[in-house]
Amino acid sequence: MIVRIMGEGQVGLDESHLGELNKLDDELLAEVRNGDEEGFRRTLGALLDAVRRFGEPVPDDSLEPSTLILPSPDASLEEVRELLNDDGLIPG
C-alpha cells in the first residue's frame, strides 16, 4: 500500500504493519475527541514515525495513487479533527 504524509511524500508500506498503525490511530482518535493536545502531538509523531520506519520512500518521480493520506507532523489538532472519520485516519 502507498501512504502519503502530507508535505513529505509517499511511502510504500506492507499491510502486515496495519495492526500496529491502527492501534496508534485509535489512540490518536481518542486524543482528538478529548482535546488532549499533548497526547495528540505524541501519538501523531509516533504514527508518522512508524510509517517512516516500516515503509520505503516512493521515488518523487513515481506517480502512485495513495491508499492512505496522513497529516503533516505540524498539523493542528483541529486540522486532524477535520480529516478524521468515525474510524480514524486508517480504515480498520
Image (tube, grey):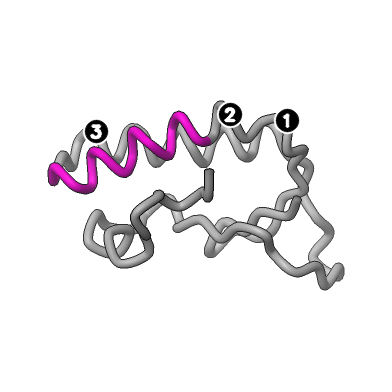
At 52% from the left edge and 41% from the top edge, which residue is drawn? Answer: 48
Report if residue 26 lies within the magenta region: yes
At 48% from the left edge and 37% from the top edge, which residue is drawn? Answer: 47
Q: Viewed as shown, does residue 53 lie left or right of 71?
A: right
Residue at numbered disc 1 = 16
At 73% from the left edge and 38% from the top edge, which residue is drawn? Answer: 15
Q: Nearer the viewer, mark 2 or mark 3?
A: 2
Asked if the residues shown at circle 1 and circle 3 are in contact, with their CB atoms under 8 angstroms apart, the answer is no
Mark 1: give few (<14), some (14-19) or many (20+) Cα within 10 Å: few
Marks 2 and 3, how far apart in space? 20 Å
Marks 1 and 3, how far apart in space? 26 Å
Residue at numbered disc 3 = 39
Which x, y percent locates residue 11?
72, 50
Q: Which residues are magenta?
A: 22-35
Mark 3: give few (<14), some (14-19) or many (20+) Cα within 10 Å: some
Q: Secondary structure at mark 2?
A: helix
Q: Nearer the viewer, residue 33 or 70?
A: 33
Given the image, on which type of amino acid does mark 3 rest? Gly
Residue at numbered disc 2 = 19
Asked if the residues shown at circle 2 and circle 1 are in contact, with their CB atoms under 8 angstroms apart, the answer is yes
**Residue 69 bears which disc, if any?**
none
Q: Nearer the viewer, mark 1 or mark 3?
A: 1
Given the image, on which type of amino acid does mark 1 rest? Ser
Judged from this view, the residue extending furthest toward the left is 35
Q: Viewed as shown, does residue 33 lie left or right of 51?
A: left
